[in-house]
């Protein structure tokens, strides 16, 4: 009996060690990916310092796409796995490190306190959303024929009012059902659902605000310490590093701004990303248009049964539980 218990404990310890080794390995790969990405972006202002900021921004976007694509192909070829949340954390700490080591010297005390406070709040928010329950629904709560990937929960057995409140969808990444499911966010390593949607939007605003603040700080630094060919190599390196992280932050602001606008639209019209993309899977979004006399065809149109008007939709979003 004691041997059985000891063997079980030994197996549990081995599993924990294996899980930790995988976690450390993925974190290391993510950290290396961040360093390679930032090095590639560093080359843009190094070789195109005389080009306008718009040209440098376009080149940085192309370089970022090539490096990320090539890095993903190499990882698949070698069988390595990275962690998207670890990549996000490494990017944050890299930019923060550049700010403290380089940009900070050209920033006022008040702006320095504000930026560091934003970074701390951003990290706390990341940890919260990674650990927060998005609204998981246990399989045992419903019968298998009621809870199906291709249909909304209880479409046959629940009335309209209860149906509008549930909106349970299936996440293929987590292999579970989530109430108010919007999408699975690899960067946060978690689903975005009813219980963390508000936190997700707050965190998205936090990212945009912090990155915009860094762009402003880097611009102030660049105006005080211009990168000229005549000055020393060390100063030139510092200025280029500040410019490359500025370009990186500006790219993040652009795509996250578009992402934010999309989610504001979803909130205003009370629809989730999953429902918009895969509305043909969910019967309540389907409106069958009647065919004209003498014609034999059926047209399926989109309708949103959850839309209650912009003000009511926003109020419902702000009171999500």
Image (cartoon, rainbow, N blue to C red):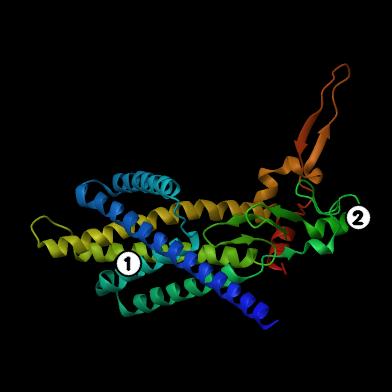
| Residue 313 showing in the rendered view | yes
User: Horizontal placement of 202 versus 36: left or right?
Assistant: right
Above or below 5: residue 90? above
Q: Which residue is mark 2?
A: 159
Residue 314 percent across, percent down from the top left: 69, 61
User: Horizontal placement of 159 versus 179: left or right?
Assistant: right
Residue situated furthest bottom in the rendering: 2
- The C terminus - image quarter: bottom right
Above or below 83: residue 127? below
Residue 79 percent across, percent down from the top left: 45, 51
- The N terminus - image quarter: bottom right
| Residue 270 showing in the rendered view | no
Q: Residue at x 81, y 46 (%)?
A: 284
Q: What is the CA distance from the residue labelled 1 to the residue labelled 2?
A: 55 Å
Between 289 and 124, the one nearer to me in the picture: 124
User: Horizontal placement of 90 versus 154: left or right?
Assistant: left
Residue 311 percent across, percent down from the top left: 71, 59
Q: Which residue is mark 1?
A: 217
């Amino acid at each position: 009996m004691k041997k059985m218990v000891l063997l079980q404990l030994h197996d549990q310890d081995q599993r924990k060690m294996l899980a930790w080794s995988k976690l450390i390995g993925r974190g290391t790969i993510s950290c290396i990916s961040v360093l390679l990405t930032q090095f590639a972006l560093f080359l843009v202002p190094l070789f195109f310092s005389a080009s306008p900021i718009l040209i440098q921004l376009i080149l940085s976007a192309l370089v970022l796409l090539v490096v990320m694509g090539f890095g993903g192909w190499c990882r698949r070829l070698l069988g390595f796995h990275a962690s998207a949340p670890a990549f996000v954390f490494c990017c944050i700490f890299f930019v923060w490190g550049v700010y403290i080591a380089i940009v900070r010297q050209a920033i006022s005390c008040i702006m320095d306190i504000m930026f560091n406070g934003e970074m701390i709040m951003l990290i706390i928010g990341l940890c919260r959303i990674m650990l927060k329950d998005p609204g998981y629904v246990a399989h045992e709560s419903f019968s298998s024929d009621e809870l199906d990937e291709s249909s909304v929960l209880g479409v046959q057995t629940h009335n309209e009012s209860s149906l509008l409140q549930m909106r349970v969808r299936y996440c293929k990444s987590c292999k579970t059902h989530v109430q108010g499911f919007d999408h699975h966010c690899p960067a946060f390593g978690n689903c975005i659902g009813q219980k963390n949607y508000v936190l997700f939007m707050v965190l998205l605003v936090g990212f945009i605000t912090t990155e915009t603040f860094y762009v402003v700080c880097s611009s102030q630094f660049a105006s005080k310490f211009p990168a000229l060919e005549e000055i020393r190599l060390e100063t030139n390196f510092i200025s280029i590093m500040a410019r490359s992280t500025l370009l990186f932050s500006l790219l993040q602001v652009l795509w996250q701004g578009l992402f934010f606008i999309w989610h504001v639209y979803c909130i205003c019209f009370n629809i989730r990303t999953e429902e918009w993309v895969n509305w043909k899977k969910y019967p309540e979004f389907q409106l069958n248009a009647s065919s004209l006399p003498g014609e034999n065809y059926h047209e399926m149109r989109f309708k949103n049964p959850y839309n209650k008007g912009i003000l009511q939709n926003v109020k419902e979003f702000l009171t999500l539980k």
